[in-house]
Amino acid sequence: MDLGKALAKVYELAEQNALDSSTTRSDEDLNTEALEQREALNTVHDFIVNQFGDNDWHVLVVDPQQFHTIIAALRFYQEKGQGSPYRRSYWIHHLATGGDEDVTSLNTEDIDDLVYMINTGG
């Protein structure tokens, strides 16, 4: 599956899941859709890895409610001064760095950039 088809399939399945969330589908239909979505997401992931040479990229498909909750959580984190490692608890710092001492967590400006990137899709 090429990247364009994979992205189209991811969007199609996400839209279908949002529209069909109130209807009952058979286990077979759900399994088929899950396999199609996994294949499409794997294609997108492989493209990213090949382009950027790193296997730590994450592709996340969310519905509108989840999307806005992520934005709100980032803004709340920022509003509470969590962009500074000296102002956050050990637990939050551990989450912000993935527990890796070599990872630098995002500061307030980086969070602005991340929110912008998420909102604009790039």
Image (cartoon, rainbow, N blue to C red):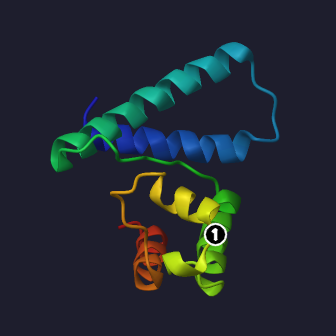
Q: Is residue 99 above or below residue 121?
A: above
Give the quarter of the image for residue 41: top left
Q: Is residue 87 above or below residue 65?
A: below
Horizontal placement of 96 versus 18: left or right?
A: left
Amino acid type, mark 1: Ser
Which residue is the extreme one toward the top?
28
Q: How many marks?
A: 1
Is 5 or 85 nearer to us in this picture? 85
Is 70 or 105 nearer to us in this picture? 105
Place of residue 102 in the rendered image (x, y in percent of width and height, measured from the top left): 33, 57
The residue wearing badge 1 is 89
Is 8 or 61 nearer to us in this picture? 61
Residue in the image at 37% along x and 32% along y: 42
Residue in the image at 59% along x and 85% along y: 81
Is 64 or 113 nearer to us in this picture? 113
| Rendered-image quadrant of the C terminus | bottom left
Residue in the image at 49% along x and 31% along y: 37
Horizontal placement of 3 versus 84: left or right?
A: left
Place of residue 79 in the rendered image (x, y in percent of width and height, measured from the top left): 63, 86
The reply to whether residue 83 is visible in this rendering is no
Residue in the image at 64% along x and 69% along y: 89
The reply to whether residue 69 is visible in this rendering is yes
| Rendered-image quadrant of the N terminus | top left
Q: Is residue 82 above or below residue 47?
A: below
Local secondary structure at mark 1: loop
Place of residue 2 in the rendered image (x, y in percent of width and height, measured from the top left): 25, 34
Circle 1 crowding by C-alpha within 10 Å: few under 14, some 14–19, many from 20: few
Q: Is residue 72 above or below residue 39?
A: below
